[in-house]
Each structure stands twice: as structure tokens, then as C-alpha cells.
Amino acid sequence: MSNTLSNMLPLGTKAPRFELLDTVSQAYKNLEILKGHKGTLVLFICNHCPFVLHINDMLVEMANQYQAKGIRFMAISSNDVLNYPQDGLEFMHQQALKFKYPFPYLYDDTQEVAKAYQAACTPDIFLFDADLRLAYRGQLDDSRPGNGIPVTGKDLKLAMDCVLNGTKVSAIQKPSIGCNIKWK
């Protein structure tokens, strides 16, 4: 299990545009269609990472809660599927159904989207405001596989609440940690 930290893209950065295949609907979707009217959460995840598996249920719970408030969620997998076939399209589709993802699970086959976001690990979390300016990038909470701390999502929930209330998110943000993105 790798312990790679997120790169911490500068706050205020405009969300890079993309158009990617949604492995659930089998349709191409872009950021303009997917963005939320109050905020947008872009998650870089994959199927096999123990850090992602550790928080999957909380991601679904938070998506169900916060999408109703105007923050849209989307997940992207950018892993090299030739060397990591368990992250392939069909397995992504199965994973989305298994966990009942209430958000699109997009495939970044060229890895250009991950590079544009400077994503480094799974999970890598990017919260943008209504203007698609980066408000938060960092950890979900302090829980990690095996550390005994419950998964609460407190850090990300606080950031999303700030975005919803129109208040500034604290610039003191802890990086996410997880498995490195499997580059080609």
C-alpha cells in the first residue's frame, strides 16, 4: 500500500475542463454538464486502492446529502488499465453499481485530466465553488485504513458547508493520502 500525498493545487485555480466517458451511462460527459450550481466535487479514485475502499461508503453518503444541496459529485479513474486491469471500464461500471454511486464514474484513459488537476493519489479530492474556483483540496478526514479512526468526512464536510454558506474555506488544509495514480 503506497502512501502518496496530494499535490495541493493552488486555491483559486479554475477547474480544468474535460470530457470523459461515464462508465455507468456509457455516455461522454463534460464538466459544464456535470457541475453543480453551488459547488462541484471532483474525486480521483480507483477500484482497488485500500484508501478509496476505506471511504467509499462515506463518499456515497456525502454525495446523497450534499448533491441535494447543490454540490455535484463526480469521480474519475485515471489509472493505467493495461498494468492494472482491475481498474478497467467494466470493473469501474461494476464498482459504481456495487457501491451505488449517486455520481458519474468517469474514465480518464489518456491521463490528461489527472495531469491537468495535478492529481497524485487515490483518493485525491478537489472542491470547487459555484464559479469553478478551487476552494478545497485535501483529505476527507483523519481516518486511514487500519488507524482505528472512524470515517466521518469532517474535513470535506466543513469545506462543503463553507462553500454552501458562501464563506471562505480555511487555507489550512491537510493533503489527502493514498495510493499513487498508476501512470502509463
Image (cartoon, helix red, strand yellow):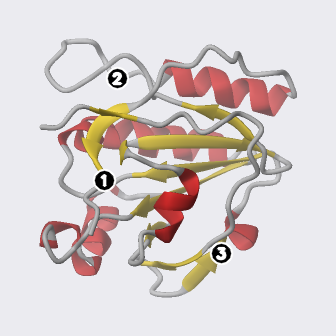
Observer-side mark, 1 or 3, equals 1
Q: Which residue carries the number 2 mark?
A: 151
The 10 Å Cα crowd at callout 1, few under 14, some 14 to 19, many 20 or more, is many
Q: What residue is drawn where x is 33% and y is 43%?
A: 56
Observer-side mark, 3 or 2, equals 3
Instruction: Specify the label residue 181 is tagged with.
Output: 1
Taking the image as drawn, is residue 103 in sight?
no
Left or right of 69? Residue 8 is left
Reading the chain from its start, which is encountered first: label 1 or label 3? Answer: 3
User: What amino acid is labelled 2 in the image?
Assistant: Val
Give whichever of 56, 133 is nearer the camera: 133
User: What amino acid is labelled 1 in the image?
Assistant: Ile
C-alpha distance separating marks 1 and 2: 22 Å
Left or right of 177? Residue 44 is right
Question: At numbered mark 2, what does the secondary structure look like: helix, strand or loop?
Answer: loop
Reading the chain from its start, which is encountered first: label 3 or label 2? Answer: 3
Asked whether disc 1 touches disc 3, contact meaning CB atoms under 8 Å apart, the reply is no
State the image quarter where residue 173 is shown.
top right
C-alpha distance separating marks 3 and 2: 30 Å
Left or right of 56? Residue 115 is right
Q: What residue is drawn where x is 76% and y is 24%?
A: 162
Q: Which residue carries the number 3 mark?
A: 30
Taking the image as drawn, is residue 107 in sight?
yes
Instruction: Specify the label residue 11 is tagged with.
Output: none
Identity of the residue furthest to the bottom in this view: 27
Question: At numbered mark 1, what does the secondary structure look like: helix, strand or loop?
Answer: loop
Q: Is residue 82 above or below residue 136?
A: below
State the image quarter where residue 140 is shown.
top left
Q: What residue is drawn where x is 49% and y is 69%?
A: 112
State the image quarter where residue 38 is shown.
top right
Provide residue 79's location: percent of width, then percent of height.
Answer: 29, 64
Q: What residue is drawn where x is 78% and y is 51%?
A: 132
